[in-house]
Amino acid sequence: MTKLFLSLHVLAVVIAIGPVTVAASMFPRALRTAHGDPGDGDARSTLRLLHRICRVYGAVGIAVPVFGLATAGSLGVLGSGWLITSILLTAAAAGLLVLRILPGQDGALTAVQADDTVTAPAVAARLAMLTGVFNLLWAVVTVLMIIRPGSTTGA
């Protein structure tokens, strides 16, 4: 059962978190493009698409901790420090996405649609920074999952 849970956990990470990190990273540049040419309907469509990817795949991402906890339970490592740290970092990344990045993208879409020339650049810079932190959190969690203390892989 452990191999099934681990497989589902890794698949959930690749399928859900990968698209969110890419789309969220692309959003600030697309926002700058849309801001630079307010009449560009394609740029606005791109922004809406990237935001939708972040929302939908972010919601699907709930499978990551669900399968991760199932895997940890079957391995008997629920009390391990590296796992608790990973859980806290995952919660921080999820909170950042839900409380700051997605609302920031909503605000950016509103600013672009209203042709707000003051708000869009500031929002793009803030979103770029928040997305960088989000991606860094996931990178640290990934490293912890690979080099976890007590690993039986011998690597």
Image (tube, rainbow, N blue to C red):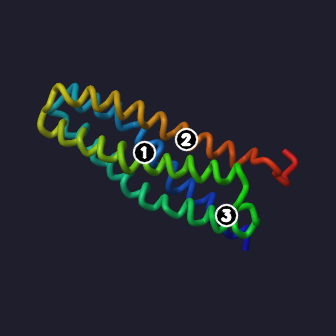
Q: Is residue 46 visible?
A: no
Q: CA distance from mark 1 to mark 3?
A: 26 Å
Q: Quadrant of residue 12?
A: bottom right
Q: Which residue is mark 2?
A: 137
What SS does tag 2 mark? helix
Q: Is residue 63 above or below residue 133?
A: below
**Count of numbered marks:** 3
- Identified at 75% across, 48% down, the residue is 148
Q: Which residue is mark 3?
A: 7
Return the residue found at the far right: 154
Q: Is residue 138 above or below residue 16?
A: above
What SS does tag 1 mark? helix
Residues at circles 1 and 2 in contact by the CB criterion of under 8 Å: yes
Residues at circles 1 and 3 in contact by the CB criterion of under 8 Å: no
Tag 3: residue type? Ser
Q: Is residue 74 visible?
A: yes
Tag 2: residue type? Leu
Q: Quadrant of the C terminus?
A: top right
Q: Nearer the viewer, residue 80 or 1?
A: 80
Q: Is 25 positioned to the left or the right of 70 in the image? A: left
Residues at circles 3 and 2 in contact by the CB criterion of under 8 Å: no
Residue 141 percent across, percent down from the top left: 62, 46
Mark 1 or mark 3: name the one nearer the start of the chain: 3
- Identified at 69% across, 45% down, the residue is 144
Q: Which residue is mark 1?
A: 96
Mark 3 or mark 2: name the one nearer the start of the chain: 3
